Amino acid sequence: MNFNKVILGGHLTRDPELKHTQSNTSVVNFGLAVNEKWTDAGGNKQEKVIFIDCTAWAAIGETINAHMGKGSPILVEGRLNYETWADRDTGEERRKISVTVEGFQFVGGKKDEGQGEKSKGGRR
């Protein structure tokens, strides 16, 4: 059995970038920062941040682009992608994992407050 599903909550690391394919399909790219905080055995507070590139297509991407900005909190649902390419300078193979967004939920306040738009309920 194969199953590829991920749900992440975090903040946008940059404003969404809207582009269109040759067939005029909207595609939006944005970065997501997901923080993990804990206290280690010595009582010291620790934090790790994971940065994930996300891609949202068509209406989902257009909605994210219209209502979200750098720092906005968001909950995304999607699937993982594994990408490989040759580095332009060294020719070495490069790799990364990204997320194709299949759904999302607004979390927090309005875009102009740097917090995203409040959800009217339900999944988008």
Image: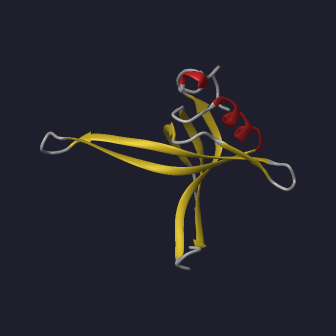
- Quadrant, the C terminus: top right
Residue shown at the point (52%, 23%) measured from the top left: 108
Q: Quadrant of residue 84?
A: bottom right
**Does residue 82 lie above or below 9 as drawn?**
below
Q: Quadrant of residue 123?
A: top right
Residue shown at the point (53%, 60%) measured from the top left: 97
Locate residue 62, reporting x and y percent. 74, 37
Q: Is residue 44 left or right of residue 3?
A: left
Which one is in front, 106 or 23? Answer: 23
Residue shown at the point (64%, 26%) measured from the top left: 122
As drawn, the residue found furthest toward the front would be: 89
- Quadrant, the N terminus: bottom right
Q: Is residue 36 left or right of residue 114?
A: left
Total count of labels: 0
As drawn, the residue found furthest toward the left would be: 42
Locate residue 35, reporting x and y percent. 39, 41
**Colouring convention used in this rendered image of the protein:** secondary structure
Residue shown at the point (75%, 48%) measured from the top left: 19
Q: Is residue 3 left or right of residue 58?
A: left
Q: Quadrant of residue 119?
A: top right
As drawn, the residue found furthest toward the bottom would be: 91
Q: Is residue 58 left or right of residue 103?
A: right
Locate residue 73, reporting x and y percent. 52, 32
Locate residue 59, reporting x and y percent. 76, 38
Which one is in front, 67 or 15? Answer: 15
